[in-house]
Image (cartoon, helix red, strand yellow):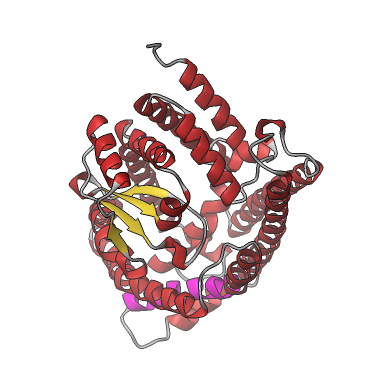
Amino acid sequence: MSAQTILLLFIIFFFLDLGWETILTLLNLHHVRQNAGTVPSAFAGTVDPATYARSVSYTLVHGRFGLLAGLVSSAIRLAVVLTGFLGTLDTLVRTLPIHPYLQGVVFIAAVSLLFWIVGLPFSLYSTFSIEARFGFNKTTPWTWIADLAKGLGVSAVIGIPVLLALFWFMDRTGAFWWIWAFGALTAFELVMSILAPLVIAPLFNKFTPLPDGELRQAIDALATRLSFRTRGIFVVDGSRRSRHSNAYFTGLGRAKRIVLYDTLVSSHGVEEILSVLAHEIGHEKHHHITKGLAISIAASAVGFWILSLALPWAPLYKAFGFAQPGYHSILVLLAFFSGPLTFFLEPLVSLRSRRQEYEADRFAVQGMGSAAGMKAALLRLGRDNLSNLSPHPLYSFIHYSHPTLVERLAALERFERALPQT
């Protein structure tokens, strides 16, 4: 396959991806506008017209802004490819009087910095204008700058050694370098999944053990009843940055912990919080985290294998303006190709995720003996977070990792009806 053919195929898949995503977004925005006048019947009596109007406005503003940001980013990405910028940058970096591995680090850092700069104005506007306009943003400029500095520091401390190690495997371990690299990176990711909540997350947020009281005692009783062991229940100061609420589990094995946003604790009743936690415990009991990790590892193996096949392919480098092959070059090219060549897999990923959410919801209803708490929690989260209550069916099918609120409420009622009668 010639360099011209490779470039043409990239452009075709690039516009297929961009066009499909643009059509989906426009369909969703049109659907939301069409249903803006009346609260959906499923929420009659639970969502007032004023709140629904704000959720419609929030969805439309975010959707239009996201569409603009995506088009600008895509235009820059296409310009970088068509102008041969990557090859020019590679030639320039190779003149630096440093080790070739470090040249690779500089190249990847420069490309990453370029797209970070492109996205910076959109990130700032989203945080300090849109989120602030709808009463969600609590991030101060100082917090934003501190997060940025910490994020760059963590990326450098972790990313540079990982890249150097990867370059070494590619350079020194022969034809099957990708197997060694895959094994090493997988082991590193497993270690990081344990260390991240203990070492990295506290750099950005304060995690406080949930104090003794009604909620703590109720959670301990729930965990005992559901045979769930955890290393602790923590409250994170999410309100420092946003009014959005959430709860999650983090860590693996004996290091896993329950984390509650302080906004969730302050705005939800005990029964609602217990139902949300029962849902999260359901994910663990159904081994969703372990299954997801296994799929991620398998996908990583396939990615490394593809990388090994593409590494010596000279026309690929020529298609994007590189004068010669390079370890860092192939990593960037893989990143450029990954979106356009895999966008058709998103519905499968979303479908699997939604199926797991239903399983966790069913577990929560069974564990609580009722769907009331879960339904109340979901409705409150939907109202408080101004969720889109009337998404286009195709848009939600492709993009939503969770069922729509209407679908979840209907499923919860079915799960409750299926409970053994006492």
Relative to 207, 135 lies left or right: right
Q: Is residue 158 magenta?
A: no
Identified at 49% across, 16% down, the residue is: 417
Camera-side residue of 36 and 187: 36
- Looking at the rendering, the stretch of residues picked out in magenta corresponds to 100-119
Up/down of 296 relative to 288, above or below:
below
Relative to 209, 388 lies left or right: right
Identified at 35% across, 33% down, the residue is: 282
Up/down of 190 relative to 39, above or below:
below
Q: Residue furthest left?
A: 254
Up/down of 322 relative to 225, above or below:
below
Q: Is residue 117 magenta?
A: yes
Q: Residue furthest front?
A: 214
Give how far across and how far down residue 421 sits, in percent: 40, 11
Q: Is residue 223 visible?
A: yes
Identified at 35% across, 88% down, the residue is: 97
Residue 219 is drawn in which quadrant? top left
Q: Residue furthest top?
A: 421
Camera-side residue of 56 and 224: 224
Give how far across and how far down residue 59 sits, in percent: 68, 52
Q: Is residue 352 visible?
A: no
Q: Quadrant of the C terminus?
A: top left
Give how far across and how far down residue 39 sits, in percent: 73, 39
Relative to 107, 392 lies left or right: right
Give how far across and how far down residue 395 sits, in percent: 66, 41
Camera-side residue of 220 and 157: 220
